[in-house]
Image (cartoon, rainbow, N blue to C red):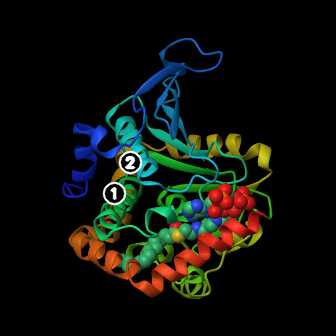
Amino acid sequence: MALASGVRFAERALLRPWALLRGTTLGRTEPAAGGGGDGARRFGSQRVLVEPDAASGVAVMKLRNPPVNALSLELLTELVISLEKLENDKTFRGVILTSDCPRVFCAGLDLTEICGRNPAHCAEYWKAMQELWLRTYLSSLVLVAAINGACPAGGCIIALSCDCRVLADNPKYRIGLNETLLGIIAPFWLKDTYVNTIGHRASEQALQLGSLFPPAEALQVGLVDQVVPEDQVQSTALSEMARWLAVPDHARQLTKNMMRKATADRLLRQRDADTQNFVSFVCRDSIQKSLQAYLEKLRQRKG
Ligand SMILES: CC/C=C\C/C=C\CCCC/C=C/C(=O)SCCNC(=O)CCNC(=O)[C@H](O)C(C)(C)COP(=O)(O)OP(=O)(O)OC[C@H]1O[C@@H](n2cnc3c(N)ncnc32)[C@H](O)[C@@H]1OP(=O)(O)O
């Protein structure tokens, strides 16, 4: 199985979730508002809310890590586990990924996880990031991103790993890989995902410039598949889901695997080296200074 080494992290998390989850309540189940039967029961964790609809075979997965859904180690872990849970439950064929935080889909890497942290922590964090990408990119489920807020960097990685992207038409909801503006670089597997989505030339330009595209431009460059008024994001995501689910699972899944396997395999072959590259890069004094300055700018911008 291509993911054999890739799933080790998730296996570890499943066997010893308490070792990875600091202060989470994974696996909690509660009735959905107004819901009744099994199909209407929510489950999930502190930072990932899952609203399953057994009748349609579709679950809505909401990122809930306020204020901006920064990808903390806990959020990454909970996302991997929630996704795995749905994949292992044959009731489900599709997941709509969206945000429970107003105006932000996902702010990308939680910079506090890599600023002023020791190399061991950065390595653990990066492995979790790799794991989420592998899990989403190769998921047998149909994944539709309902992007209801800003979607920079790591947020864009999650959206790009889905099969289809619907973006709310709000000029503040920009999407793209802005790593260079932080003084960091996208890893090769992220670059590959970008190229697979929008092509080489557009990626070359957008990656170097750190472009964050407003909705109309994101649609034009092919970064998203639909741009719709904000109140129609969810319903459009559901319509897209129906279109994808109309295809027999086995044919769609094998085709997805054929299209994506080589890209994923490239990371699987050199996962440890990629982690070491990441750690030695982000732990450099100069990079730490850039990240600190960027975080500081974000914090001051508020006041
Ligand atoms: C092998 C490879 C070798 C080397 C590779 C090296 C690196 C690999 C890179 C990997 C790829 C991924 C990279 C990333 O994801 S980096 C993160 C990039 N993200 C951003 O640039 C987004 C920054 N945030 C924003 O622009 C805004 O916050 C946003 C999302 C538009 C929302 O705006 P708004 O609603 O106005 O909210 P605030 O800006 O006021 O933010 C509220 C609060 O959140 C803090 N915050 C925001 N973003 C982050 C973050 N990413 N991490 C941590 N904290 C964040 C912000 O500071 C505020 O905090 P406060 O304490 O002031 O409340």
Q: Earlier in the sequence, mark 2 or mark 1?
A: 2
> Is 201 drawn above or below residue 111 in the view shown?
below
For the N terminus, which image quadrant? bottom left
> Is 78 drawn above or below residue 211 in the view shown?
above
Whether residue 302 sits left or right of residue 90 in the image: it is right
* Rendered image: mark on residue 131: 1
Residue 5: where, in percent of width, then height? Answer: 19, 58
Residue 81: where, in percent of width, then height? Answer: 36, 41
Does the CB distance between marks 2 and 1 fall below 8 Å?
A: no
Whether residue 173 sits left or right of residue 91 in the image: it is right
Name the residue carrying label 2.
Answer: 77
In percent of the image, x 78 and y 63: which residue is there? 303
Structural crowding at the residue carrying mark 1, measured as other residues with C-alpha within 10 Å and reported as few (<14), some (14–19) or many (≥20): many
* Callout 1: SS: helix
Whether residue 218 sits left or right of residue 195 in the image: it is right
> Is 132 drawn above or below residue 299 in the view shown?
above
**Disc 2 residue type (three-letter):** Thr
**Ligand 1 is in which quadrant of the figure?**
bottom right
Give the label, 2 or 1, closer to the camera.
Answer: 2
Residue furthest top in the image: 36
Taking the image as drawn, is residue 120 in sight?
yes
In percent of the image, x 48 and y 16: which residue is there? 38
Structural crowding at the residue carrying mark 2, measured as other residues with C-alpha within 10 Å and reported as few (<14), some (14–19) or many (≥20): many
* Callout 2: SS: helix
> Is 290 drawn above or below residue 109 in the view shown?
below
Residue 165: where, in percent of width, then height? Answer: 60, 56
- Asked which quadrant contains residue 234, the reply is top right
* Rendered image: mark on residue 294: none
In percent of the image, x 66 and y 46: which residue is there? 101
